[in-house]
Amino acid sequence: MTANTEYDLEVLASNASGDSAAASVTVSTLPNAPAAPTGLTTSGITQTGITLSWTKSTSATAYKVRKDSGDSWTVLGDVATHSFTGLTANTQYTLEVVASNAGGDSTAASVSATTNNVPPPPAPAAPTSLTTSGITQTGITLSWTKSTGATAYKVRKDSGDSWTVLGDVATYSFTGLTANTQYTLEALASNAGGDSAAASVTAVTVPAAPTGLSTSGITQTGITLTWTKSAGATAYKARKDSADSWTTLGDVATYTFTGLTAGQQCRRGFGRGVG
């Protein structure tokens, strides 16, 4: 028979005497399944949603859609659009649609689309309240107040250096520095949105220890200590044993210890100051 065609089906009873009158019923064959929808387009794409539209198929009475081949079909009415929701940001989906009628389903038509990425947050402000501590001949510790929204920090010891990337911390110790040298220590805050401007503070490492120590003028109660000055030092401190308090001196290169005990060995100690 021909699809989607009405037929009057008749039947009669018969025996040796003849045939009965005919009885009949009218019935139509099922239509052919529709062709697949055409003209698939996507619109209204967000981080979690995509709207799919299509051109309707002749003789279709309903449509089915799904967002990927592994999903179940969602049955729709005689429509030409559907909005997928609850999707994952920055993810590609293959959206499928079939046309349907009493005769069955068409083959699936599909189109791919990717949801929007989650926008990055704004870059944080620069760290504040930069301070230095623990300054030695070869090291300086830099501390700062964290920036709102920052997830990491970067530091460097001078503008010509590369940045050292840190985690979500508020302090960093620079090592391997040169004695009696000024450094401009910089820190910036960072997150997925980018880097802040750099904040900076200047600090000078401690001068090197005095060298060339020698003693002279030794008496029963006194010893004169002489040394070679350290570059960058503006003052010196001296003591006669490690348990004693330091005596603060000016920018000198000699000091005479007095009031000592005869026959007693002294261990000279030194400190040095910077301006």
Image (cartoon, rainbow, N blue to C red):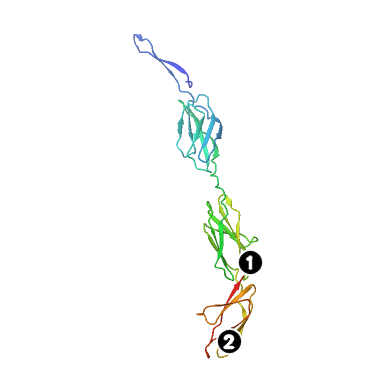
Task: Please tell me which residue lies in front, 77 or 157.
Answer: 157
Q: Give the position of the C terminus as an image quadrant.
A: bottom right
- Residue 24 % position (x, y): 39, 14
- Residue 108 % position (x, y): 51, 33
Task: Please tell me which residue lies in front, 241 or 173.
Answer: 241
The amino acid sitting under disc 2 is: Ile
Please name the residue shown 54% across and 55% down the image: 152
Please name the residue shown 55% across and 62% down the image: 172
The residues bearing labels 2 and 1 have C-alpha atoms spaced at a distance of: 36 Å
Sequence-earlier tag: 2 or 1: 1
The residue lying furthest to the front in this view is 259
The residue lying furthest to the top in this view is 17
- Residue 192 % position (x, y): 55, 50
Q: Which numbered marker is on residue 7?
A: none
The answer to which image quadrant residue 200 occupies is bottom right
Q: Is residue 201 above or below residue 229?
A: above
Q: In the structure shown, which secondary structural element does the residue marked by tag 2 occupy?
A: strand
Q: Is residue 263 above or below residue 63?
A: below
Task: Please tell me which residue lies in front, 98 or 137.
Answer: 137
Task: Please tell me which residue lies in front, 130 or 64.
Answer: 130
Q: Which residue is mark 2?
A: 223
Does the residue at mark 2 contact the one at mark 1 (Cβ under 8 Å)? no
- Graded by Cα atoms within 10 Å as few (under 14), some (14 to 19) or many (20 or more), the crowding at tag 1 reads some
The amino acid sitting under disc 1 is: Gln
> In this figure, what is the number of numbered marks?
2
Q: In the structure shown, which secondary structural element does the residue marked by tag 1 occupy?
A: strand
- Graded by Cα atoms within 10 Å as few (under 14), some (14 to 19) or many (20 or more), the crowding at tag 2 reads many
Q: Is residue 173 above or below residue 71?
A: below
Foreground disc of the pair 2, 1: 2
Q: Which residue is mark 1?
A: 182
Please name the residue shown 45% across and 33% down the image: 74
